[in-house]
């Protein structure tokens, strides 16, 4: 599925964009399902097991910033997480593939919330770092609508501190950390149907969507079959093996010398990364509310 140059780029930069992975019909189905979920969110007023809501959400104007574990709620999302082309891409990188989990991050036009700089590895360290997130573009990704930004090569560097001033995990890097250099960050741009693949240790984030266009990004996390979570797998071995998509089951985790910083003590605000980052007290990206206040 991947060319030698794409594999080399991923090894070097920790991120690649692969065009035309999903067909127009597949993307249209995922958009329809997503629109239905947003319509359903009008019936709730607070975050629940499915929805993470924007602060400005209301029944009259439903605003969703994340659909949690979408693969658990609809068959179209389930199929997308196990798409043969996605599995083939990851097999080219690791040889074996195990599904982890997923989320649909939604940045609605004009107010979609930013995500502060972070490394996924800070949330779920494993015995080795053959892990990646695959992002499926349900809409065209542009600089204006808050495309994901990644610092090339940062996956080969340290695990930065994701703890807040109180010492608790907050899921965000302090923008003043001298080890954080985002001057080289590049946007992951592409047309709907393209996918991004970013390494679990790559530093990334995204700005508020100030454009008039939607930005819906369906993200699934994967790991090699011999990469085991250091914090354990609460559902047991049988469920863990059910997540295997390519390769053979193994009872021998591969241990590599990778830096680890545990996400403990746990975040003050549990739930999605948006909730975790509420406690950071330090912002790099401008939220929509700030721009609205400045315009008044």
Image (cartoon, rainbow, N blue to C red):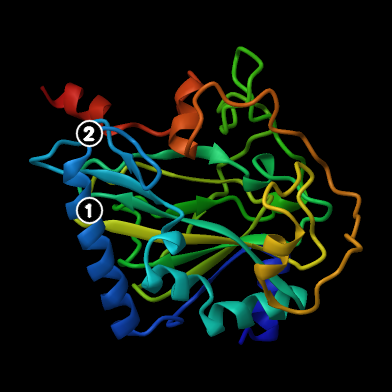
Residue at 75%, 34% in the rendered image: 262
Rendered-image quadrant of the N terminus: bottom right
Tell me the residue at 82%/55% (across/down): 128
For marks 2 and 1, the one nearer the N-term is 1
Determine which quarter of the picture holds residue 247: bottom right
What secondary structure is found at the residue carrying circle 2? loop
Where is residue 249? Give x, y as percent: 81, 72
Q: What kind of element bears circle 1?
A: helix
Q: Quadrant of the C terminus?
A: top left
How many numbered marks appear?
2
- Residue 56: x and y in percent read 20, 32
Q: Give the numbered dot on residue 9.
A: none
Q: Which mark is residue 45?
A: 2
> Residue 279 placed where, x, y %?
49, 21
Is 201 rendered above or below residue 72? above
Q: Position of residue 175 (x, y in %)?
A: 55, 28
Residue at the top extreme, as displayed: 166
Q: Residue at x 74, y 39 (%)?
A: 159
Q: Are marks 2 and 1 in contact (CB under 8 Å)?
A: no
The answer to which image quadrant residue 141 occupies is: bottom left
Q: Of the numbered discs in the image, which one, if any, rests on residue 38?
A: 1
Left or right: residue 8 compared with residue 249: left
């Amino acid at each position: 599925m991947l060319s030698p140059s794409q594999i080399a780029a991923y090894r070097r930069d920790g991120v690649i964009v692969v065009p035309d992975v999903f067909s127009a019909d597949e993307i249209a189905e995922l958009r329809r399902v997503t629109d239905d979920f947003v319509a359903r969110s009008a019936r709730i007023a607070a975050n629940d097991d499915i929805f993470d809501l924007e602060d400005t959400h209301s029944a009259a104007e439903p605003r969703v910033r994340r659909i949690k574990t979408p693969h658990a709620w609809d068959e179209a999302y389930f199929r997308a997480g196990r798409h043969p082309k996605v599995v083939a891409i990851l097999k080219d990188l690791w040889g074996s593939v195990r599904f982890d989990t997923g989320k649909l991050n939604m940045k609605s036009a004009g107010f979609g919330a930013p995500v502060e700089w972070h490394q996924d590895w800070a949330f779920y360290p494993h015995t080795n770092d053959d892990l990646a997130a695959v992002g499926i573009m349900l809409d065209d990704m542009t600089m204006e609508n808050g495309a994901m930004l990644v610092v090339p090569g940062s996956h080969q560097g340290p695990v930065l501190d994701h703890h807040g001033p109180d010492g608790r995990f907050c899921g965000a890097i302090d923008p003043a950390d001298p080890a954080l250099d985002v001057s080289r960050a590049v946007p992951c741009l592409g047309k709907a149907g393209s996918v991004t693949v970013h390494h679990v240790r790559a530093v990334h984030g995204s700005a508020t969507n100030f454009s008039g266009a939607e930005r819906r990004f369906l993200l699934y996390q994967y790991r090699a079959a011999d990469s085991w979570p250091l914090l354990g797998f609460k559902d047991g071995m049988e469920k863990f093996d059910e997540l295997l998509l390519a390769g053979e089951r193994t009872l021998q985790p591969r241990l590599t010398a990778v830096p680890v910083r545990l996400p403990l003590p746990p975040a003050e605000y549990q739930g999605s990364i948006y909730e975790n980052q509420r406690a950071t007290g330090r912002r790099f990206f401008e939220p929509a509310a700030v721009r609205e206040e400045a315009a008044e």
